[in-house]
Amino acid sequence: MTGAAARLDVRGSRRSGLLLGAAFMAGMDEIVFHQVLGWHHFYDRSTSAIGLLSDGLLHAAELMAIVAGLFVLADLLRSRTFSVAFFRAGLLLGLGGFQLFDGVVDHKIFQVHQVRYDVPLLPYDVVWNVVGVVLLLIGFELHRRASRNALSP
């Protein structure tokens, strides 16, 4: 790494982006699909009261991830070791990672909820997971470019 790049905290910048990205995607899921559209709760295999409780727990977890991500970010900015490039890569990786994890693990493996009910699921599942994969691919490409730039003289 060059002198300037050596001072940057790559892992911390990436970690802050990952936390904030995953939290933002969880928040968008919670607000749009759970609350505005009312298509599902985080846990739909019980009563609606349990579904609301599970939504509240997801919301609390996303808020804790936002606070943790902001603390890491504030520390990086204070120490002047923040890397915008690795933060952006981490942000996209967090967004896509949460989306794909939710689509594969929550929806299909554990079946705690589906995107919608009483409709053909395939189009919803495809869109849900393709969005996650696209975000992950963009994040990986940004990370590859940031790593290459950090190593170049």
Image (tube, rainbow, N blue to C red):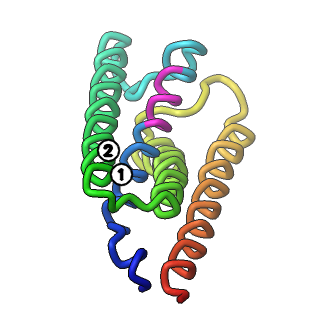
Instruction: Based on the picture, tell me whether residue 28 belongs to the magenta stretch.
Output: yes
Query: Front-most of 6 and 121?
Result: 6
| Residue at 62% over, 69% down | 141
Q: Where is residue 142 in the image (x, y as percent from the top left)?
A: 59, 66
The N terminus - image quarter: bottom left
In this picture, residue 137 sits left or right of residue 73: right
Which amino acid lies under the numbered mark 1 shown in the image of this protein? Ser
Compared with 114, 7 (above or below) is below
Instruction: Based on the picture, tell me whether residue 71 belongs to the magenta stretch.
Output: no
Q: Where is residue 84 in the image (x, y as percent from the top left)?
A: 49, 57
Query: Front-most of 28 and 54?
Result: 28
Q: Name the residue under label 2.
A: 69
Compared with 150, 84 (above or below) is above
Compared with 77, 62 (above or below) is above
| CA gap, disc 2 and disc 1 | 5 Å
Q: Where is residue 143 in the image (x, y as percent from the top left)?
A: 53, 69
| Residue at 28% over, 33% down | 61
In this picture, residue 29 sits left or right of residue 50: right
Q: Give the range drawn in magenta.
A: 24-31
In the rendered structure, are the residues bearing label 2 and label 1 in contact, judged by CB atoms less than 8 Å apart? yes
Q: Is mark 1 on a helix, strand or loop?
A: helix
Mark 2 nearby-residue class (10 Å; few <14, some 14–19, many ≥20): many
Q: Name the residue under label 1.
A: 16
